[in-house]
């Protein structure tokens, strides 16, 4: 059965996807420029050129748009496919490079927006639910990286603990760079990475000793 198309030959499904992407892109620009709270759906409609009613048909709420932004940014940041390829290659330095980028990513214009959304999650249950969903993606990807460096069931609990330490520290360093000179954050990130290497090396030594 042929797929339904618009008059211009664009499938309905593709047109809906493009419209949603346009809404999310407009919302991101406004959230970055004005903040999450100061941006309403009417402003997103004006910026995107898409009617308010249509936005609510595509997204149930402003928080649903935020969820789409967070999920997309999370996947771009984690680059799980690239990490998996590096793990399959058997090159531990690839994994270490991925970890270093996780701990101290390059500054991005959307960083203040992410920080605002994190703060909002403490008082908004819907935003908190978004981060809970994303947290599982982050944990799963981080555990895959650490398992490549420290395989074996004997270290499962310590890998989980190290995952929590790394993710919490990375979030703290992101906040740190808003308040401190870049070189201070770089020094802190380098120290954190050395501490992680030390912990991983200790587990690897235990594994080698049997």
Image (cartoon, helix red, strand yellow):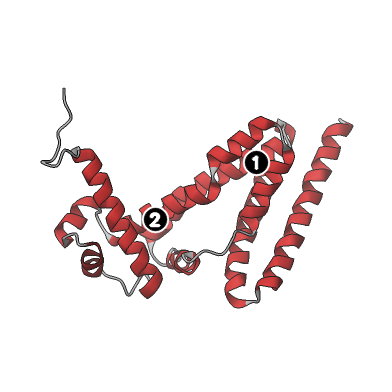
Q: CA distance from mark 2 to mark 1?
A: 24 Å
Asked where in the image residue 62 lies, by quadrant, the reply is bottom left
Q: Is residue 172 left or right of residue 92?
A: left
The foreground one among 124 and 134 is 134
The percent position of residue 137, horizontal first and vertical second, equals: 51, 44
In the image: residue 76, left or right of residue 34: right
Residue nearest the observer in this picture, 136 or 47 = 47
Q: Is residue 177 above or below residue 26?
A: below
The mark total stands at: 2
In this rendering, position of residue 145 left or right of residue 110: right
Give the quarter of the image for residue 36.
bottom left
Other residues around mark 2 within 10 Å, as few (<14) / some (14–19) / many (≥20): some
Examine the image and state in which quarter residue 186 appears.
Answer: bottom right
Between discs 2 and 1, the one toward the N terminus? 2
Residue drawn at the location 16% of the way across and 22% of the way down: 1
Q: Which residue is mark 2?
A: 69
Question: Decide: marks 2, 1 in contact (CB < 8 A)?
Answer: no
Judge whether residue 205 can be spotted in this image.
yes
Kind of element beneath mark 2: helix
Which circle marks residue 198 in the picture? none
Q: Which residue is mark 1?
A: 145
């Amino acid at each position: 059965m042929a797929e339904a198309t618009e008059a211009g030959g664009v499938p309905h499904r593709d047109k809906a996807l493009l419209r949603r992407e346009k809404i999310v892109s407009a919302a991101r620009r406004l959230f970055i420029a004005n903040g999450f709270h100061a941006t309403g759906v009417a402003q997103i409609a004006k910026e995107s050129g898409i009617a308010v009613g249509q936005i609510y048909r595509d997204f149930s709420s402003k928080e649903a748009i935020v969820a789409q932004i967070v999920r997309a940014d999370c996947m771009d940041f984690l680059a799980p496919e690239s990490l998996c390829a590096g793990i399959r290659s058997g090159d531990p330095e690839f994994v270490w490079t991925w970890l270093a980028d996780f701990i101290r990513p390059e500054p991005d214009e959307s960083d203040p927006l992410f920080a605002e959304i994190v703060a909002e999650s403490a008082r908004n249950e819907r935003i908190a639910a978004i981060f809970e969903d994303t947290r599982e993606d982050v944990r799963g990807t981080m555990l895959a990286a650490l398992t490549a460096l420290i395989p074996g069931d004997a270290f499962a609990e310590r890998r989980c603990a190290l995952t929590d330490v790394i993710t919490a520290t990375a979030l703290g360093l992101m906040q740190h760079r808003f308040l401190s000179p870049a070189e201070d954050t770089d020094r802190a990130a380098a120290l954190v990475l050395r501490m992680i290497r030390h912990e991983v090396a200790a587990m690897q030594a235990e594994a080698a000793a049997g």
